[in-house]
Amino acid sequence: SIIILGRETVIISSDSWTLRLRVPAAKAFALIFPYTGYKTVKRSFLLNDKNGIASSYGNLAIIFDEKGELDSSLLYYQKAMEIFKGEKNQRQIASCLDNMSVIYAQKGDFTEAIKCNDQGFGIRKAGSDTLGMMASMENLGLIYIKQKKPVKAIEISNEVIVLALKNK
């Protein structure tokens, strides 16, 4: 469960723990998750660190992906991406798009998967992010595998090898 805090002082308890939290009114917004794996979200919201919050949303997206809750995963990648856009963090925007492309492929929505992948690759190429471009290309290969297009996947993998050898 998620507890949303919007006051200066809050007391929350469960069978195994109690949390008393006092924060300044300007920062009196937090998400607390009972599961310790969500600790970074709590920290990020309390510090109002926008990139940290976005990264935490990305972590939640990964958790939902692992649980098979793909729509929730996409929602959290979208939330992360919106924050990264506000922060003009191009590398992380591209990363969100790449990850979303894989989720869309898992859902069988290959049109949207390729669209997200193309956008992420374009951002990485514009920023001369060779490693990121290679990651985007590998994700495209995974999309082709999911589409049962192994020849295209092999072509992409070979392009990644050429790019890697050129930039070593």
Image: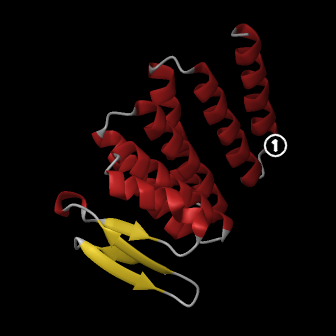
Residue occupying image coordinates x 24% and y 65%: 28
Amino acid at the residue labelled 1? Pro
Residue occupying image coordinates x 51% and y 53%: 58
Using a 10 Å C-alpha cutoff, classify the residue at mark 1 as few (fewer than 14 neighbours), some (14 to 19) or many (20 or more).
some
Label 1 sits on a secondary structure element that is: helix
Residue lying farthest to the left in this orientation: 25
Q: Position of residue 113 (x, y in %)?
A: 56, 50
Most foreground residue, 118 or 94: 94
Q: Position of residue 32 (x, y in %)?
A: 43, 71
Hey, which quadrant is residue 68 in on the image? bottom right
User: Quick check: 110 left or right of 28?
Assistant: right
Regarding residue 50, the answer to whether it shows in the image is yes
Quarter of the image that includes the C terminus: top right
Most foreground residue, 37 or 142: 37
Q: Is 114 situated above or below 138?
A: below
User: Quick check: 124 left or right of 90?
Assistant: right
Q: Is 156 situated above or below 69?
A: above
Residue occupying image coordinates x 65% and y 33%: 135
According to the image, label 1 marks what residue? 150
Hey, which quadrant is residue 166 in on the image? top right
Q: Is 59 situated above or below 98?
A: below
